[in-house]
Amino acid sequence: MSPTIASVVIPVTDLAATKAVYTTLYGEPHTDEPYYVGWAVGDVQIGLDPSGDVAGGPVAYAGVDDVDKARAAAIAAGATERTAPREVSPGSRICVLEDTDGNAFGIIGK
């Protein structure tokens, strides 16, 4: 699989209030939990994360086959690690990196 934008995760301070805003745009969420609210918008997942770093802003995640391989390649090219790879659901791992200007981007895959 070539990388695509698989999801955008938006950190929030007030999950209920922010959910109301995005529900007007995307309809009822497919996942509505105290730790995450998410919508499928075309081929992209839009998620609200109440435990995310609001100061860090939203993170777009590139879907890849191998998180470790993509992470290593990005770091070799000059990226730095913001959060190490971790499992978020069975068979799905993520990490967040920063480009050379400090902009966050994520990687999601196996």
Image (spheres, rainbow, N blue to C red):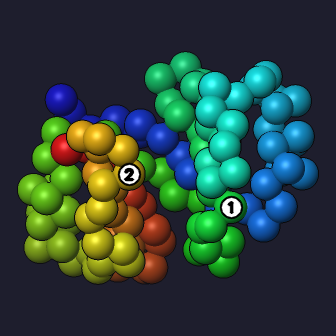
Sort mark 2 into few (<14), some (14-19) or many (20+) by Cα contacts within 10 Å. few
Residue 101, compared with residue 105, is above or below; it is below
Please tell me which residue is depicted at 14% across the width and 47% down the height of the picture: 66
Query: To which quarter of the image does residue 87 belong?
Result: bottom left
Pointer 2 or 1: first along the chain: 1
Q: In this view, does 110 lie to the left or right of 99?
A: left
The image position of residue 10, as x and y in percent, is 64, 55
User: What is the spatial separation of the Cα atoms under label 2 and label 1, in whole angstroms?
Assistant: 15 Å
Query: To which quarter of the image does residue 105 belong?
Result: bottom left
Residue 102, compared with residue 44, is above or below; it is below
The image position of residue 77, as x and y in percent, is 16, 71
Three-letter amino acid code of the residue under disc 1: Pro
Sort mark 1 into few (<14), some (14-19) or many (20+) by Cα contacts within 10 Å. some
The image position of residue 41, as x and y in percent, is 60, 25
Tag on residue 50?
1
Q: In what element is the residue under mark 1?
A: loop
**Residue that label 2 marks:** 88
Q: Which of 9 and 33 is in front in this view?
A: 33
Q: Nearer the viewer, residue 29 or 46?
A: 29
Please tell me which residue is depicted at 52% across the width and 58% down the height of the picture: 59
Q: Is residue 56 left or right of residue 71?
A: right
Q: Is residue 63 visible?
A: yes
Please tell me which residue is depicted at 13% across the width and 59% down the height of the picture: 68
